[in-house]
C-alpha cells in the first residue's frame, strides 16, 4: 500500500512500527527541583566526536518545560524486565518518582536502577520538528550494564533474539539438513542455539500466515486471548498482550471499528465477527503446529511440551 | 562503569549498542542520476503532523552530496532475511545497485524490494550534529509489508522475539508453576508461545553468566566459534557470528588486544589465553544446559533436540 500526499496517521504509525527500537525513559530535574520522566523510543546516537545523542518529545508534553530549563538530562535504556517502568513513565501522574528506585546524577537528574545502560547528557540544542521538539544532548557520563533490552515493535513490547549461525546446515548432508547423528560440532549440539533457530524457522513460516488475515500480530493476539478467556478488562488484556496503553487502545479501537469486539462495563468480549476471526486465527496457529510436528508422535510432542514448561518454570 | 568527561569512544559505542534498533538502507538519486544507498540505524520518527522522520549520516560519507542535492530520499526498513543488503550497502562500492532488485519512486529514488516497510521522503532540513549531518525528511508516501525486521543490538544482527504472556503461570498451582495436566487454556498448550517463553527464561538465566566473563555476547560467540572450528577467515567468521563488518572488526581488534586471538595469513585462530577463555565460555554454556535439563533423561533430551532440528530443517 502506497499512500500519496494525505498521510493516514494510523497507517503511518503502523508503518513506522516496522522499525523496531529499544525503549528509554528520559529524566531530568528542573532548577526548582521538579523531577520529570517520559517514556520515549525516539532515541538515537548522532555523533561520536563530540558524543551527541538525540530524542524527540511532543510539543504538548507538560514535561518539556523541565527538559528545556534543566542543564542535564538522562537517557535510561530499559532492560527486558522493566516493562513496568515503560508503562509507568508513559502515564500522566503527579509524582512519577514516588515509588521508583533511583539515584541522582549531574544536576540532580534521576538515574533509574536496573537499566541496560544510562547516559547523562548536557542539553546541547533543541530543534523544531513539526509537532515535536528534537532534543540533542552531549553525553558527559554513561553506565553500561549490558543487560538484554526491552524492545518496541509494531505496537508491542518484544525482546531481542540473538541470530543463530547463518549456516547451521553447512556441514550437513546433501539435502542441506542437519544430521544429528553425523554432527560432532558443539554448535550443532547446543540446545540454546538450536531453540533459537527453531523459533526463527517457526516464526518465518507462521507469521506470514497470521498476517494474511489482515491483522497485525498484536491485534491477532487480543482476539486469541479473548477467545480463550472470554471477558477481560483492559488491565488484564494489557498483561496478556504486552502492549503499551496507547497502542493497546489503538488496537482496541480498530477491533471495535471492525465489529470484532465490544465493551460492556469494564469488560471486553468478542462479537460474532470477532469469534469467527479468533477461530480462524486459532485454526491457523494449530494447523501450523500440527504440520510442524507431524514427524513426531503424540508422546514425543508431550515430552517436548513438558520440557518447555519445565524451562519456563525454572526461571 | 561511569566514564567522566573524556568519553572512551569504543566504550561509548558499546554502551549505545544497548539500544536495539532496526536497520535501514537510505537511498537517493542525484539530479544527474547518481544512485546512492547507505546502511543506517539512526532512523527514527519525529512528528506525525506533518509526517517527519530523521536519520544521520557521517560528514565524511561520499554519499552525502547526493542526499544534499536530491529532492527526495527513501527509508528502506530491512526485513529479517535482508542481512545481505545491510552488509552490501555498508561497504564502499562503485555501483552499489548493480546486482540489486529495486523499483524507482519519486525523483527516481531506488526503493529496495522485500523490505518490512519503505518511506519516500522529501528533504525537509539538514542540521549539523557534530561529526554527522542530521537529515530530516517529510514522508510523502509509504509501503507497509509488516515483515519481521532485522535488528541491530550490541554490534550484532538479531531478530525480534514476541513477548509471551506476562503471566503464563496465572491459572496454575500454588507453586506458581504451569501444571500441564490441569491447564485447559489453549494459550498454555500452544507450543509456539511456550517455545518463546522457554527461550526467554533460558536467556534470562544464561546471559548474565556469559556477561560475567567480561565479554559481550558477540565476542563470546567469536571465541566459541573458533574453539569448535579452529581456523576461520573473516568471511566465514562473519557468517558464524552475524555481525556487521565494522563491529566484527572492532570485536576482533579487542580480542587481539586481549591476546585471545591472532591472525595468520587469512585465518584467525585462538591463542592460549583465547583457548582458555573459549573453554570457560563453553563450560558456562554446557553447565547451564545440563542444569536446565536435569529433570529429564538423556533419551528425552535427545528427543527434544531431534524435534528442534526437525523444526529448523522444515523452513
Image (tube, coloured by chain):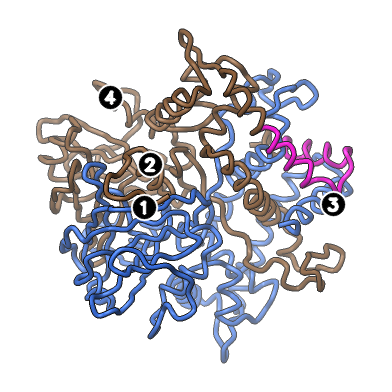
Chain colours: A blue, B brown
Q: Is residue B126 left or right of residue B214?
A: left
Question: Does dot 2 land on a helix, a strand or a loop?
Answer: helix
Residue B11 is tagged as: 2
Residue A223 locus on image (x, y percent): 60, 70
The residue indicated by pointer 3 is A302
Residue B92: image quadrant is: top left
Disc 4 with disc 3 on a shared chain: no
Q: Is residue A27 left or right of residue B204?
A: left
Q: In whole angstroms, how far apart are the C-alphas of marks 3 and 2?
A: 47 Å
Q: Chain of mark 1?
A: A
Residue B246 locus on image (x, y percent): 37, 30
Mark 2 neighbour class, 10 Å CA radius: few under 14, some 14 to 19, many 20 or more:
some
The residue indicated by pointer 4 is B92
Q: Chain of mark 3?
A: A
Mark 4 neighbour class, 10 Å CA radius: few under 14, some 14 to 19, many 20 or more:
few
The residue indicated by pointer 1 is A142
Q: In whole angstroms, how far apart are the C-alphas of marks 4 and 1?
A: 32 Å
Amino acid at each position: 500500500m502506497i499512500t500519496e500526499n494525505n498521510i493516514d496517521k494510523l497507517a503511518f504509525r503502523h508503518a513506522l512500527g516496522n522499525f523496531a527500537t529499544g525503549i528509554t525513559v528520559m529524566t531530568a530535574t528542573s532548577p526548582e527541583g521538579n523531577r520529570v520522566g517520559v517514556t520515549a523510543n525516539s532515541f538515537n546516537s548522532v555523533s561520536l566526536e563530540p558524543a551527541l545523542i538525540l530524542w524527540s518529545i511532543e510539543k504538548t508534553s507538560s514535561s518539556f518545560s523541565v527538559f528545556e530549563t534543566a542543564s542535564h538530562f538522562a537517557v535510561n535504556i530499559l532492560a527486558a524486565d522493566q516493562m513496568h517502568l515503560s508503562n509507568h513513565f508513559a502515564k500522566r501522574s503527579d509524582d512519577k518518582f514516588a515509588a521508583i528506585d533511583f539515584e541522582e546524577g549531574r544536576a540532580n537528574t534521576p538515574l533509574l536502577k536496573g537499566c541496560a545502560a544510562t547516559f547523562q547528557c548536557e542539553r546541547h540544542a533543541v530543534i523544531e520538528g513539526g509537532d515535536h521538539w528534537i532534543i540533542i544532548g552531549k553525553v558527559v557520563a554513561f553506565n553500561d550494564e549490558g543487560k538484554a533490552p526491552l524492545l518496541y515493535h509494531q505496537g508491542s513490547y518484544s525482546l531481542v533474539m540473538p541470530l543463530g549461525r547463518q549456516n547451521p546446515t553447512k556441514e550437513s548432508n546433501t539435502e542441506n539438513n542437519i544430521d544429528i547423528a553425523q554432527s560432532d560440532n558443539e554448535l550443532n549440539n547446543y540446545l540454546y542455539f538450536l531453540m533459537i533457530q527453531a523459533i526463527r524457522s517457526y516464526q518465518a513460516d507462521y507469521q506470514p500466515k497470521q498476517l494474511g488475515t489482515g491483522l497485525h500480530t498484536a491485534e491477532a493476539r487480543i482476539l486469541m486471548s479473548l477467545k480463550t478467556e472470554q471477558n477481560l478488562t483492559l488491565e488484564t488484556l494489557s498483561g496478556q498482550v504486552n502492549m503499551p496503553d496507547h497502542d493497546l487502545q489503538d488496537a482496541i479501537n480498530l477491533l471495535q471499528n471492525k465489529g470484532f469486539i465490544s465493551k460492556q462495563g469494564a469488560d471486553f468480549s468478542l462479537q460474532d465477527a470477532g469469534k469467527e476471526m479468533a477461530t480462524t486465527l486459532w485454526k491457523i496457529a494449530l494447523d501450523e503446529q500440527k504440520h510442524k510436528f507431524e514427524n513426531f508422535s503424540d508422546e514425543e510432542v508431550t515430552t517436548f511440551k513438558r520440557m518447555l514448561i519445565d524451562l519456563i518454570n525454572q526461571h
